[in-house]
Amino acid sequence: DSVPEGYAVSYSNSADGVSFAKPENDWVTVTNQKKPDIPEEVVQTTTALNLTKTWEDAADYKPESVRFTMTRTDANSAETAYTLTLTQHNGSLSAVCDPAISGAAFTAAIEGETWKLAVTDLPESKMVNGVEEYRYRYAITAEEAVEGFASQIAGDGANAFTVTNTRKRTA
């Protein structure tokens, strides 16, 4: 009753191999033939996420590094969290993602009072022979508290996010 993987079953009641869906008599020959190897058609897409970090009233102080949570959500609403760390040193900005995302590229820069991060080549979807294996959405969902600053995250509903840190002043 079971057919080995990769094989198809056909029924024949004569030596000439004429096949039919259901045997008409008690005499049946079962022939297993290996299905031809059909190459998989794999279509993968990527997406990008852009993060703009602005500092308000912070000309005299900014921390050396900040951490964000980037969340990847699949079609079943399962989430995977990644920690993005931006670190400034001597006027340049670097980015680290933990855990790493295979194939993703990170470009970080400082423009005046703004830190910018572009994450490209993030896996978005994969289809094999027309069947979707996964589809992901990405978002910046949190920022680790920055001492002396209030933080606000805004997004465009797609993949562009702005995190604004405003200096808390005591009277």
Image (cartoon, rainbow, N blue to C red):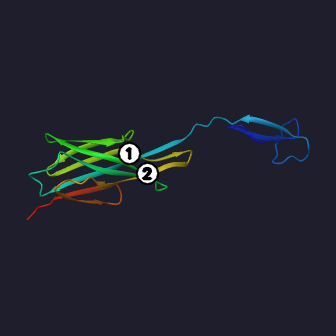
Label 1 element class:
strand
Out of 99 and 33, give the one closest to the viewer: 99
In terms of image quadrants, where is residue 98?
A: top left
Tell me, for residue 152, which label it has, or none: none
Q: Is 20 on the left or on the right of 66, as rendered?
A: right
Amino acid at dot 2? Tyr
In terms of image quadrants, where is residue 55?
A: bottom left
Q: Position of residue 104 (x, y in %)?
A: 36, 41
Of labels 1 and 2, earlier in sequence is: 1
Q: Which residue is mark 2?
A: 136
Q: Is 26 on the left or on the right of 47, as rendered?
A: right
Quarter holding the C terminus is bottom left
Out of 19 and 154, give the one closest to the viewer: 154
Out of 160 and 59, give the one closest to the viewer: 59
Callout 1 touching callout 2 (CB < 8 Å): yes
Quarter holding the N terminus is top right
